[in-house]
Amino acid sequence: MNDRNAIQDTSSKGDNRFIDIDGLQVHCRVRGCGSPALLFMHGSFLSLRSWRLVFDRLAEHNVAVAIDRPAFGMTSRPLPVSGKRNPYTPEGQADLVVELLDRLGLRDAVLIGNSTGGTIALLTALRHPDRVRGLVLADPMVYSGYATSEFPRWLYPVFKAIAPFGSRMASVMIRLAFGKLHRTFLCDESLLSREILEGYRSDLMQGNWGRAFWELLLGSHNLKLEEHLHKIAVPALVMTGDQDRMVKPGETIRLSRELPGAELHVVADCGHLPQEEKPDFFAERVSAFLVNHFQQ
């Protein structure tokens, strides 16, 4: 097995930890040993809880790190500071991935991202190609949604000025739509138990969460990822649920064609979260991908 990262077994130190990166307390779960390292990034309105059905299995032969992205989960929610990196922008999140690898003593990692987490994984590969060994992208947003959302330039200072009001309005709207949104994530809505929904609600709605989400909105802009996909030269596994209602399956299939050498899997009877709705299939495909590309 390739020992490129010289990784130590971290499980004995406890799975859950907070890592300070420029004042941001990043909540992550770390388990296992072995190379390549795997770094998991969840989608919007989720948390590292989204990997609960596949994380331990994929940590059996690799060090695995799952994070709560800024504005979500138990990661802290500070206000952006002028002159410092804004952790809520896509670029800030991508750079945060590299800082986290440094703190954990990892040279590089295979990034596993779902939805907007896949967007950040692709951006990280473009900004820091020497730190990304491979990509696993489950229903990523590339041609629509978060990856392309952008307000007219003149609106940004207005939104900044009304941040206290805007964040309260965003909080109200999210509270009202939260359950419906999560049911939309799944093909089989019966899989969303009250316990899981309340867990996700608790993960999101803590601390200054409304303001943090507002800052996430203000930090978004059109990344134009499709113009740069040809620059990515690492192995990639692309996966889409055939019943995804958040990212059209055709967009993910298009990504598999435009991302050099990408391997595609269309998951039958599955929505936006294959790691939750079809965990066995997800783990098996990812495990095979890792063996084929990194453990020969």
Image (cartoon, rainbow, N blue to C red):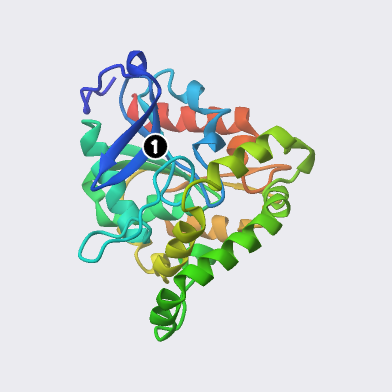
Q: Position of residue 37 (x, y in %)?
A: 33, 30
Q: Position of residue 62 (x, y in %)?
A: 37, 23
The residue that appears at 49% across and 22% down in the rendered structure is 56
Q: Answer above or below: position of 63 versus 217.
A: above
Quadrant occupied by the N terminus: top left
The residue that appears at 44% across and 55% down in the rendered structure is 119
In this figure, which residue is indicated by the disc labeled 1? 27
Q: Residue furthest top?
A: 12
Q: As drawn, is 171 to the left or to the right of 63?
A: right
Q: Position of residue 18 (x, y in %)?
A: 34, 34
Quadrant occupied by the C terminus: top left
Q: Residue furthest bottom?
A: 154
Please, what is the three-letter code of the amino acid marked with disc 1?
Answer: His
Inspect this view and state whether residue 277 appears. no
Q: Answer above or below: position of 76 versus 88.
A: above
Q: Position of residue 179 (x, y in %)?
A: 71, 50
Q: As drawn, is 94 to the left or to the right of 264?
A: left
Query: Circle 1 sits in a helix, a strand or a loop, which is it?
Result: strand
Q: Answer above or below: position of 80 versus 56.
A: below
Q: Nearer the viewer, residue 36 or 181?
A: 181
Q: Nearer the viewer, residue 236 or 245?
A: 245
Give the crowd class for mark 1: few <14, some 14-19, many >=20 residues within 10 Å.
Answer: many
Inspect this view and state whether residue 174 appears. yes
Q: As drawn, is 282 to the left or to the right of 269?
A: left
The residue that appears at 26% across and 38% down in the rendered structure is 101
Q: Residue furthest right?
A: 190
Q: Quadrant of residue 282?
A: top right
